[in-house]
Image (cartoon, rainbow, N blue to C red):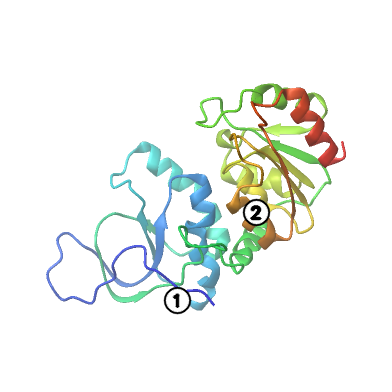
Amino acid sequence: MYTYRPDIPVSRSLEPIVDPLQLEQAIYGGHFFYAWGHFLIETLSSAAAASKFPKVPIVFSPWEITTQNEWTIGYERHVAPVLNAAGWGKRQIVVTARPVLAKSLYVPQRLTSFGTASPSIHPAISNVYDRIRSALGQEQDGKAVLVMRSEDHRRWHPSERAVYEALANRGVLAILPQGMTATAQIGVISRAKTLIGFTGSVLHNSVFMAKGTQVIEIGDQAGRSSADRIQSELCGIRGQNLVFVPGFKDTSLSADDLLSSVLDAAGL
C-alpha cells in the first residue's frame, strides 16, 4: 500500500475564486515538471490508474513555472505523446497555474514521494512504462546505447567527453537525448540490451527498456561508491541489472580507466 499526498491543496470551499478555470469534471494529475527526469518519475505516475477514471480533462499544476512561453508550450507538445501513451489516451490535457473549479474532481494516487525513506517509487508505475514502451517502443535489437549529456551539465565529469568518443569508436550507438523528440529517444532506447551513461535523468530512460536488460551507471560525484538511489529503484522496479562504475577515487578517474570498467561490465 502507499499513501497519496496531494501536490496542491484540494478544497471544497464555496468562497469566491479569482479567475478560475471552470470545468464540469476533471482529473487532477499532479505536478507537471519541465525537467525530464521528474516528468518520468512524478508527472507520469498518476497515469497508473488512468483506466479507472472517466474520459474527462486531466489538469496538471506546473511545478515552479507559472507563466506560459514558447519554451513551456514547446515542452508540453514534446511530451504530449508520452502522456497519451501512459494511459491518458485522447483526454484533453491542461497544464495551468490558474485555480480550477470543478463540480466533480477525481484525484489519482501519486506513486512517487521524494524526501521519504526508500523506497520512494511504487512498483505500480512499471505499468505506465510498459504502456509507453508498447505504444512508442521498438523491438529489442540486442545492442548497447550510450546516452550522453551536454557539456554544460552541472556535474560534467572531467573524462566525460573522452569516454563518449571512445565508446562511439567501439561501435556503441551514442545519442544526445535532449536533442531528440521524446518519441524518438524512447524508440531508440527501447531497442537496447545495454544502456550506458553518467548518473542522472538521461539514464532514467532505462524505464523504457525491456525486463532483463542491463544499465551501466558511471558516477559523476566524488565520494560516491554506489548507484544513484532513484536509478537503483527504477532498475529494481523494471527488473533490470544495474552496474555502477565509480567515476572517482582520490581524484577523477581517467577515460581509459572508466572505459575499461564499462567495457568489462558490458561484455564489449
Task: Say left or right for 36 vs 131.
Answer: left
**Farthest residue toward the left?**
16
Q: Is residue 248 above or below residue 58?
A: above
Residue at screen point 25% across, 73% down: 11
Q: Which numbered disc covers residue 232? A: 2
Residue 166: quadrant of the picture = top right
Q: Which amino acid type is marked by label 2? A: Ser
Residue 234, position as x, y percentages in the image? 63, 56
Q: Secondary structure at mark 2?
A: helix
Q: Quadrant of the C terminus?
A: top right
Q: Secondary structure at mark 1?
A: loop
Q: Which numbered disc covers residue 119? A: none
Sort mark 2 into few (<14), some (14-19) or many (20+) by Cα contacts within 10 Å. Answer: many
Sort mark 1 into few (<14), some (14-19) or many (20+) by Cα contacts within 10 Å. Answer: few
Q: Are marks 1 and 2 in contact (CB under 8 Å)?
A: no
Q: Which amino acid type is marked by label 1? A: Pro
Which residue is label 1 attached to? 54
Q: Quadrant of the N terminus?
A: bottom right
Q: Please tell me whether mark 1 or mark 2 is closer to you in this view.
A: 2
Q: Is residue 207 visible?
A: yes
Q: Is residue 136 visible?
A: no
Task: Say left or right for 155 vs 103.
Answer: right
Residue 122, position as x, y percentages in the image? 57, 67
Q: Is residue 33 above or below residue 129?
A: above
